[in-house]
Image: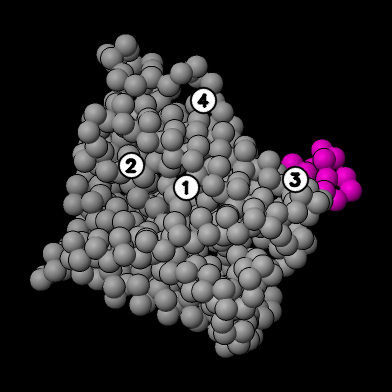
Amino acid sequence: MVGMGPFITIPLFLATMGGPQAMIGWVLGAIVALSDGLVWSELAAAFPGSGGTYHFFDAIYGESRFGRGVKFLFVWQFLFSAPLEVASGAIGLTQYAGFLWPGLERTAWHITAAVPLVGLLDWHVAWGKVLAMGVMLAITVLAYRRIEVAGRLMVVLWVGVLVTVIWVIVAGFAHFDAGLAFDFPPGAWTVDRRFVMGLGAAVAIAMYDYVGYYQVCYLGDEVVDPARTIPRSIVISVFVVAIAYLAMNVSIVGVLPWREVIESKHVATDVMLRLHGESTAHVVTLLIIWTGLASTFGALLGYSRVPYAAACAGHFFRGLAKTHPTGEFPHRSLLLISGLSTLACLADLETVIAALLTSRILVQFVGQILTVFYLRGRTDLRGRLPFRMILFPLPALLALVGWLFVFVTSQQRTVLYGLGSLVLGLAAFGLWDRPQRTLSEFDAPTP
């Protein structure tokens, strides 16, 4: 959970509601993450194993056509969301690199073209975008090797992550100014459409930063006593990280006026520049670039295994089931996720964050919540679930409302991205599944 997120999203976060009142988005996001974490916990305890959502759908819905469909759609939406998440780390890294090399904001390419039904396309690509794409290519080279070697490299990269987070928090609170931190603009708490839409955007950014609370569910085969360990892991992680991220936000706006924060491309660097001068700012910038490399590398390494695993099980395109002839790692799946992530680096950070959530919400998060209700209705499992969330169905309903709130308050283009990826997925499944279809597989499983 701890990675590049808070370093690159604090300006976007405050901008959603135009002031420090956006901090309530962290609290609401923590409530949604905790509620959704209980959904993950119930599924992971009932069906321990590695693979997360894919594993749950496989264990619960099996090889019925409905089961094949939801598994295929999960991997399909993964191809639309995972590359954006990977790319966000590279994009954020280059924003901080801009402090060291201001020339990265200059235009590298300028494309002007007439597009039918759209009009004149005037596209500027800054050198920062070129650098982000170069970072993706370099990280691909690092990940293009056996998992044992890549895993040791990831541990080394992550050493700098926690150091950076703690340093920024301590430095900020050591020079904290409450007058700056709680400088609310006029009408900050007026509840209208602008407030609601801004709050939805704030919760979305918070959820992007919290994402990872369920990662333990992808490693279920390696967890001892999953019915107890996984719920504890998720609940503790959400609480600890929520407090850390809230502390980082508050400490930063207690040093820099929030209006300056909104305009900043490298806010943690600017804080250190204000407090300790240019030399310290350079050191922190290098640490955050280190953090960006660790986040991007770790995400690419883990996410590249998902399409491969699904293909090996016969639930996605078989071509992705191939491994490297000498290195024995899923090189095709790795190159696919890497290539899509490299292209995603051309988009702006705010769009990338919103689009990766809207493409994931309906199939993965809403799908899992509905699956819990389905499980609770199965007579053969009633009373035999190892972990049952407290106050059911309240946490599941809170998670459902929270995710749908994020979806409907997103920008129209990102909502269309999410819905479009789902429609394309349904069409792709129809083509992929046709040779395997039998008359007995048309019905969804019944309780």
Among the two numbered marks 4 and 3 on one chain, the one whose residue lies closer to the N terminus: 3
Residue closer to the observer: 28 or 404 = 28
Seen at 43% across and 30% down, the residue is 39
The answer to whether residue 34 shows anywhere in this view is yes
Tell me the distance, in whole angstroms, between the alpha carbons under discs 1 and 3.
Answer: 22 Å
Residue in the picture at 53% in, 59% down: 167
Q: Residue 300: x percent and y percent?
A: 35, 62
How many numbered callouts?
4
Q: Which residue is mark 2?
A: 216
- For the C terminus, the image quarter is top left
Residue type for callout 2: Val
Residue tagged 3: 21
Answer with left or right where residue 368 lies relative to residue 438: right
How far is disc 4 from disc 3 in space, using C-alphas? 25 Å
Indicate which disc, 2 or 3, sits on the residue closer to the N terminus: 3
What residue do we see at 35% from left, 65% from top?
157
Identify the mark nearer the N-term, 4 or 1. Answer: 1
| Coloration of the structure image | one colour
Find numbered disc 3 in the image and state the secondary structure of the residue it sits on.
Answer: helix
Q: Is residue 369 above or below residue 70?
A: above
User: Which residue was labeled with disc 4?
Assistant: 395
Front-most of 15 and 6?
A: 6
Please name the residue that numbered disc 1 is placed on.
Answer: 211
Q: Main secondary structure of the magenta part?
A: loop
* Spatial CA span between label 4 and label 1: 18 Å
Query: Would residue 87 be visible to someone looking at this image?
Result: no
Q: Is residue 274 magenta?
A: no
Magenta stretch bounds: 184-196
